[in-house]
Amino acid sequence: MRTITFLLQKEFRQIRRNKTILPIIFVLPIIQLLILVHATTFEIKNVNLCIVDMDMSNTSQQLINKLEGSKFFEITSTTFSYNEAEKQLANNNADMLVYIPQNFARNLIKQKTATVQFIPNAINSNFATLAFSYASNVVMNFNKSITVDWAAHISPQPIKQIETKARYWYNPELNYKWYMYPGIMVILISMIGIFLTGLNLVREKEIGTSEQLNVTPIKKYQFIISKLLPFLIIGLFELILATVLGKIVYGVPLLGNIWVLVGFTFIYLLVVLGIGLFISTLAETQQQMMFIAFFVVIVFLLLSGIFTPTESMPVWVQKFNLINPLSYFMKVIRMIMLKGASFKNLINEFISLSIYAVAILGLAIFRYRKTA
Amino acid sequence: MNNRKVEIKAVNLTKKYGKFIANDKLNFEVYKGEIFGFLGANGAGKTTAIRILCGLSKPTSGDITVSGFDVYKQTEEIKKNIGYMSQKFSLYEDLTIAENIELYGGIYGLSRKFIKERTNHLLEKLQIMEHKNTLISSLPLGWKQKLAFSVAIFHEPRIVFLDEPTGGVDPITRRQFWDLIYEASSQGITVFVTTHYMDEAEYCDRVSIMVDGRIEALDTPAVLKETYKVSNMNDVFIRIARPDFIINNE
């Protein structure tokens, strides 16, 4: 125990004097949390439209007005040539092409039906789907209003309509920042755990001090505790910092119990510290450490469900996520913060993460050699 | 000499890496309080052997004891009784002199009070008291080496292993460094040292000379010079390591 206090004292002195690590601990998280949240917006605004109105009728103009009135669309060009419109789409001047054929109004009155064509640029399929569904909404509204208009000519009684209204639970304003923010917190805590620990350990190997420590009677567990504990403390500090920052800047709620969140973060940190320690036993230089860690983190991160729910990924990815610690923590932190999940709701994740922590730390400690 | 206590005993020490034999049946004994020079050309296998004796790696075969402890099973016991200074400079650059001493002292289980007293004593001896709180990174190399040695014997080990301790240091500092070695030896600490400088070999009580993983000669510098009929250790070394090389003054 005495030895550990000497070693911890050394670690904290070194961290305090390190001019790169201090900003990484204090400044980087703030920038990351404030900026990255916006990088992942799922909302779309300002879809640029190119209108081809071959009908030139009052009715077609009404439809165009409705599109223009929507906050999602902006009409950037109008033309009478379909080819010209396609060019606009190809040159990225327009995101969606709206084609209103000739006799649009006439067909609507005579045959009670008419067609209008939307062609979205679907390179980003998510964007195209959303743009199309917004446009369909506008058309539906337009439909409703002309039915009501025309009905008014026939009967004085207003037509009854069924209206649907959605109430969104857990994130009533569909604020994507609330969804993303906890995800960014997971990235932050994972990075601290894997990179800082791993680099610290490999650095000692590189400069040769680890060899010096290896010829002392230091016990393996003493060394490992002294290496992991400082970053465990820093990780928990980052959690508190991020939670407070999220509340102040974006109003991200913390509906669940703070101690449940801290407890889960503690276990999760054990997992990532274990991963950092494990990778450090594979790497001889800080460069190698960085490459391996980047590979691992990127794979884990993109499959973790940070952007899209894991339930909609292929089955094998879902199976893979059984060994993806980020995916557990991603789920846990969102459930606690946004849904107010209690410990009872998360018992399965607790068991999984605990097993993970024991396994990876065990493996890393087993692999760590005092003889190296 | 032979009635003195044996501190290190190696019988047929062998270390293989695949087919490559780094150490081939080394046999030697090192006595208590002795300065034992472990010489050899680059790549002769000196560092491999020293790492085995320090418990950093396991030999392939052979019976080896250090301070009476077995290098296969009792490495942790060995580590309590030795000091080690590697080729790579091994103090923490981002800690001060006092902090480095405190750290290593603490690791060997010395009390804070004791560490404090001895630190002051040591820094006075080295005449660097005013640099007590200076970061190691801002010290000249010669100072660092002397400090690293002082830290390696701070816990008063029975044996200290020095792996090319004076590499890249000027002659005056090297002389001062050897004064420190003599002092340690006079206090009963056994010194096991590797070096490239043959003038330093003259300072040793006994030397062994390794060629391609084998010990080719082992005796006092005087006897070796006598045997090979040369006037200095430099020529002894060349005679043994490069027999085809003709020495002019013959």
Image: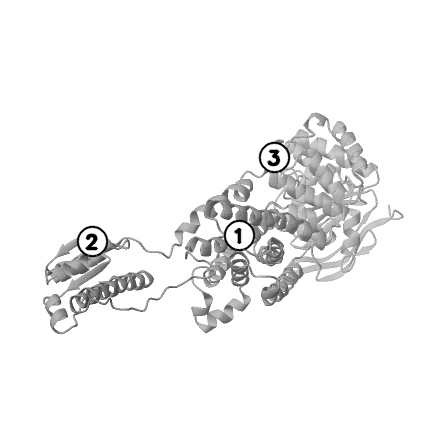
Within 10 Å of disc 3 (Cα), the crowding (few <14, some 14-19, many 20+) is some
Q: Secondary structure at mark 3?
A: helix
Mark 2 and mark 1: span between their CA atoms? Answer: 43 Å
The residue pinned by badge 1 equals: A191
Q: Name the quadrant containing residue A161.
A: bottom left
> In the drawing, what numbered circle is on residue B137?
3
Q: Position of residue A94 (x, y in %)?
A: 22, 56
Q: Nearer the viewer, residue A356 or B66?
A: A356
Q: Nearer the viewer, residue B199 or A261?
A: A261
Q: Position of residue B237 (x, y in %)?
A: 67, 44
Q: Position of residue A155 (x, y in %)?
A: 19, 69
Q: Name the quadrant containing residue B33.
A: top right
Q: Are marks 3 and 2 in contact (CB under 8 Å)?
A: no
**Label 2 is placed on what type of residue?**
Ile
Q: Secondary structure at mark 1?
A: helix
**Label 3 is placed on what type of residue?**
Ser
Relative to A164, is A180 above or below?
Answer: above
Q: Position of residue A114 (x, y in %)?
A: 16, 70
Within 10 Å of disc 1 (Cα), the crowding (few <14, some 14-19, many 20+) is some
Which label sits in the foreground, 2 or 1? 2
Within 10 Å of disc 2 (Cα), the crowding (few <14, some 14-19, many 20+) is some
